[in-house]
Image (cartoon, rainbow, N blue to C red):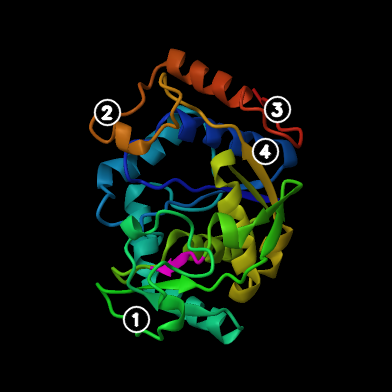
């Protein structure tokens, strides 16, 4: 069994990230499995070295061991940064197209999408045969009408809830869904623990997996846990901590993380290993 903790260092990790790390650790311990650390640093505009360092200090403070991945921030910079793999992801997208995945160049900005790109983007780019141009277009996957994917016993209409998702960004970087499936495939991940807000993302990634040669990904066990919210009831965001500082590294705070993780209502028998 192989699972992973895969934070994005776009801010200091918050209580929800810490609770997810604990849940992943409990899962690996209970099954005698491997916990891999993967740091998604693709968004160069928001990633900072101190945010990457925070990942390692958080896991050390929580006593969460990992068996594969970078040992520290210098090791990460030297050999594990996903930003250094852009050409690899580009080749994987081309291979997916060769396997039958349809993509098209799109000029539509995020502000133009008032709803999922069901049946194509609002600008009609799906049939416009536009070229991909850095800074001007992104590449979207053509998700056919009636694309249904089963996740956690529910059938997700991917074309309706997500639509034609961006796989390659206009800044010439891979989008999260493409890179994540490739990384999980390469690491032979068998169990993914993520928030309930990512159920639809899971469905899209399962749609993409066969085109990316990730047939094993389709057999992955997905666990979607509840979300940790702030006092206002809104989902926590790392951007809230980018200027406000990191989680306090105290025993009291660690106890709160453990209580939060235990209360998230995770199925499949994940319980406290402490």
Marks 4 and 2, how far apart in space? 29 Å
Q: Mark 2 points at which residue?
A: 245
Picture layout, residue 32 above or below residue 262:
below
Tell me the SS state at disc 4. Answer: helix
Q: Mark 1 points at which residue?
A: 132
* Badge 3: residue crowd in 10 Å (few <14, some 14–19, many ≥20): some
Marks 3 and 4, how far apart in space? 8 Å
Q: Taking 219 as reference, is 71 left or right?
A: left
Q: Residue 27 carries which label?
A: 4
* Badge 2: residue crowd in 10 Å (few <14, some 14–19, many ≥20): few
Marks 2 and 3, how far apart in space? 30 Å
- Region rendered in magenta: 164-168
Rendered-image quadrant of the C terminus: top right
Q: Earlier in the sequence, mark 3 or mark 1?
A: 1
Q: Taking 205 as reference, is 108 left or right?
A: left
In which image quadrant can residue 190 be found? Answer: bottom right
Q: Earlier in the sequence, mark 4 or mark 2?
A: 4
Picture layout, residue 22 above or below residue 91:
above
Tags 3 and 4 touching, CB below 8 Å: no
> Residue at (54%, 35%) from the top-left corner?
20
Q: Mark 3 points at which residue?
A: 271
Marks 3 and 1, how far apart in space? 48 Å
Marks 2 and 1, how far apart in space? 39 Å
- Measured as percent of width and height from the top left, residue 199 is found at 60, 47
Closer to viewer: mark 3 or mark 1: 1
Tags 3 and 1 touching, CB below 8 Å: no
> Residue at (60%, 39%) from the top-left corner?
24
Marks 4 and 1, how far apart in space? 42 Å
Q: Which of marks 3 and 4 is nearer the N terminus?
A: 4
Tags 2 and 3 touching, CB below 8 Å: no
């Amino acid at each position: 069994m192989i699972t992973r903790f895969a934070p994005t260092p776009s801010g200091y990790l918050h209580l929800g990230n810490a609770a997810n790390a604990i849940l992943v650790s409990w899962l690996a311990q209970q099954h005698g499995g491997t916990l891999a650390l993967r740091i998604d640093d693709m968004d160069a505009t928001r990633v900072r070295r101190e945010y990457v360092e925070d990942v390692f200090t958080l896991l050390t403070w929580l006593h969460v061991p990992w068996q594969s991945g970078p040992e520290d921030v210098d090791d990460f910079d030297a050999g594990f940064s996903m930003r250094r793999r852009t050409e690899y992801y580009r080749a994987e997208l081309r291979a997916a197209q060769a396997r039958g995945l349809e993509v098209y160049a799109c000029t539509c900005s995020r502000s133009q999408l008032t709803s999922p790109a069901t049946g194509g983007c609002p600008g009609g780019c799906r049939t416009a045969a536009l070229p991909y141009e850095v800074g001007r277009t992104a590449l979207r996957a053509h998700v056919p009408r009636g694309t249904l994917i089963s996740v956690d016993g529910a059938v997700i209409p991917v074309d309706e809830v997500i639509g034609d998702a961006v796989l390659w960004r206009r800044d010439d970087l891979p989008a999260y869904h493409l890179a994540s499936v490739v990384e999980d495939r390469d690491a032979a991940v068998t169990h993914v623990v993520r928030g309930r807000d990512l159920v639809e993302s899971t469905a899209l990634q399962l749609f993409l997996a066969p085109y990316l040669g990730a047939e094993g990904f389709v057999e992955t066990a997905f666990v979607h846990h509840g979300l940790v919210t702030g006092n206002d009831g809104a989902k926590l965001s790392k951007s809230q901590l980018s200027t406000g500082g990191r989680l306090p590294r105290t025993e009291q705070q660690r106890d709160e993380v453990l209580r939060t993780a235990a209360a998230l209502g995770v199925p499949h028998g994940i319980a406290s290993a402490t």
